Image (spheres, rainbow, N blue to C red):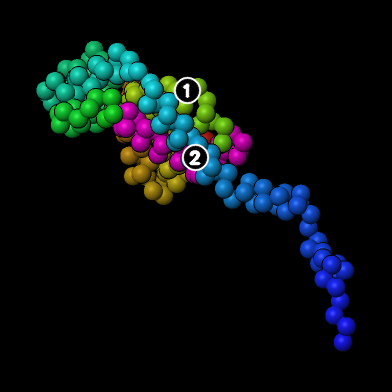
């Protein structure tokens, strides 16, 4: 039996060109992994930017209050002239009292809080995908509320938690109320936001109708 020459045997046609294969891989990546890619990119850029950020005066002042102030002053006296609740100082207090490095500790706290916030925004938010994947890199969410170590990072986290627990606020009120309490503890602006949300909820319960119908 005559064996055909290997060179004369035509290659099998897979039916897919390299361009089609690359397109399918890109489509699969876009459907499955873009959220994760954006989240990892955000965290990596945040760590890099935070490492090169020189702390401002108000960041250092919060650390010094946590390190030197008495618990009574932090809870009852200092908030009167600091302009926001003492929860941020209480978070920094164990790190400052243990004499851990100032820059590393306060930046690590801010990075962790911001990373949790962006995880909720990217993976749990019902917003359109282009908006979810672009918001983390906006000026305020990326720089003012994350790179700069301030209680605004807590404020945004509490706001996201309130948004996540809002749809089931009547069936499971305690997580929603807890997020509003955290909103109040984060900043004086949070007290205003939480108060407005609570008033709307109370009106909804009193009226017996959903405000979403208006």
Q: Position of residue 18 (x, y in %)?
A: 75, 52
Q: Secondary structure at mark 1?
A: helix
- Circle 1 residues within 10 Å: few <14, some 14–19, many ≥20: some
Q: Is residue 143 magenta?
A: no
The residue that disc 2 covers is 39
Residue 176 in view here: yes
Figure check: 89 above or below 162: above
Q: Is residue 30 above or below residue 68?
A: below
| Magenta-drawn segment | 107-132
Magenta stretch, main secondary structure class: helix
Relative horizontal placement of residue 24, taking residue 97 as reference (left or right): right
Q: CA distance from mark 1 to mark 2?
A: 17 Å
Please provide percent x and percent y for residue 102.
Answer: 24, 25
Q: Quadrant of residue 53?
A: top left
Q: Residue at x 41, y 49 (%)?
A: 171
Q: Name which residue lies at 38% across and 41% down.
A: 176
Local SS, label 2: helix
Please report the residue visible at 42 percent of the width from the left and 29 percent of the height from the top.
48
In-image side of 132 versus 55 (left or right):
right
Q: Residue at x 50, y 37 (%)?
A: 41
Closer to the eye: label 1 or 2: 2
Task: Place residue 46 in its image quadrant.
Answer: top left
The label number, if any, that marks residue 140 in the structure image: 1
Give the camera-side residue of 103 and 124. Answer: 103
How many other residues sit within 10 Å of disc 2, few (<14), some (14-19) or many (≥20)?
many
Pointer 1 or 2: first along the chain: 2
Q: Residue 209 in the image: x percent, y percent?
A: 51, 40
Residue in the foreground of this view, choosing between 171 and 110: 110
């Amino acid at each position: 039996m005559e064996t055909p020459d290997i060179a004369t045997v035509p290659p099998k046609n897979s039916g897919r060109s390299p361009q089609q294969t690359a397109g399918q891989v890109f489509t699969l990546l876009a459907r499955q992994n873009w959220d994760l890619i954006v989240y990892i990119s955000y965290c990596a850029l945040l760590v890099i930017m935070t490492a090169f950020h020189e702390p401002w005066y108000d960041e250092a002042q919060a650390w010094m209050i946590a390190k030197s102030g008495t618990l009574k002053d932090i809870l009852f006296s200092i908030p009167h002239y600091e302009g926001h609740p003492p929860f941020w100082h209480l978070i920094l207090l164990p790190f400052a009292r243990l004499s851990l490095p100032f820059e590393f500790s306060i930046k690590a706290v801010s990075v962790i809080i911001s990373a949790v916030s962006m995880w909720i925004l990217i993976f749990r938010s019902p917003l359109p995908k282009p908006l979810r994947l672009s918001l983390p890199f906006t000026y305020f969410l990326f720089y003012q509320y994350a790179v700069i170590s301030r209680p605004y990072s807590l404020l945004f986290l509490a706001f996201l938690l309130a948004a996540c627990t809002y749809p089931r606020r009547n069936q499971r009120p305690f997580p929603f109320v807890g997020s509003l309490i955290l909103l109040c503890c984060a900043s004086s602006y949070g007290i205003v936001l939480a108060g407005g949300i609570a008033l709307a909820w109370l009106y909804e319960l009193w009226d017996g109708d959903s405000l979403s119908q208006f």
